Image (cartoon, rainbow, N blue to C red):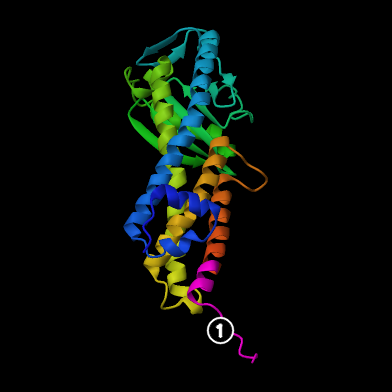
Amino acid sequence: MLKLGFIQILIETCKGTTIFYHVLRQSPWKALFHFLLLVLICTVAVWGYQSFALVRGVNTAYERLEKACGKITVSEKGMFPEKEPEKNRMIFSLPQLELTYVANLEAEIPKIDIGIAAAGVVWMPKALFFWFSGYDTNRYLVYTISNGKYLKIDLVHPDRMNAHLKEINLEAAKAGMVENSMPVLMLLNPLVLKIFLLASTLIGNGLLLFLPFFFLILMTSLIFSALGSRRLQGKLFFRDYFVLSCYIAFPCLLVSAVWLALGLKIGFLTYQWVSILSFYIYFMIVMGRIERWLSPPPPDNDGD
């Protein structure tokens, strides 16, 4: 069997399908290692590209925060701005982040997510509420840090945002603010927020790139080893489909990484759909080639 290195396989899988005949008997563990290595490379590349905009956004956000709120005071009662501590208001909305201050839940609450930012923070005296759009067309993925003591993750419909904030506030009111907690440090110190956001972005991108493709690799290998082409039965088994799928994912991972880094959305083509469609289209092309290699059609006997 021809021994191939990671770089050569990556180049050849992007150029065409010929390489798949040579990697067919590759060790599953080596194929998995190569897949994980490419996931790591793509994750770092996407993270590096996004980091510049993220750091710039944090700097701009803190400039606007200081201008709108002045000094932030912290006590057991919570975190309050020096300027207009009782007034609910949107402090800023940037392409990377939106910040809304809500001190009085009985007064009018500003609209959360006005359509500019892909993520935002609702700052309440004793809790920070992080929301992220794009994970579900009808709901927000939200993280709640209250009093620095617990982390709560929910999927919330836009119509329930205000009710959800009230539930958070009731929970947060049961305890005093922990003055050296992560929410306080993130709000007071831009460096802490940058580290938190950079680490979260790195981990989030890694999971977004790894989980969908690993699921596709496993499911495709299981299904085709059990219900695949009759012409390949007895010739290809689960380990073979697994190896092929790991390498089929190579060019698809690169396309998806670009899509994720740029935050593209063209019609229904979100990152998730690009990952699924690119993988299965390329998989069917490769399997058609493998079938012709391993089980060519019988020769035509009508001649002579």
**Secondary element type, mark 1:** loop
What residue did someone put label 1 on?
Answer: 298
Residue 240 visible to an observer of this rendering: yes
22 horizontally vs 276: left or right: left
Highlighted magenta segment, given as a residue range: 289-304
Q: Position of residue 145 (x, y in %)?
A: 40, 29
Q: Residue furthest front?
A: 304
Quarter of the image containing the C terminus? bottom right
Kind of residue sitting beneath label 1: Pro
Name the foreground residue: 190 vs 296: 296
Side (left or right) of 44 relative to 303:
left
Of all residues shown, which one is farthest toward the right? 267
> Is residue 227 positioned above or below 246 on the image?
below
The residue depicted at 58 percent of the width and 51 percent of the height is 273
User: Which of the 4 quarters of the picture holds residue 262?
Assistant: top right
Task: Kindly tell me whether residue 86 is visible in this rendering.
Answer: no
Q: Quadrant of the N terminus?
A: bottom left
Q: Is residue 33 above or below residue 100?
A: below
Position of residue 124 measured from the top left corner of the image (x, y, whole percent): 47, 22
Residue at x 54% of width, y 67% of height: 289
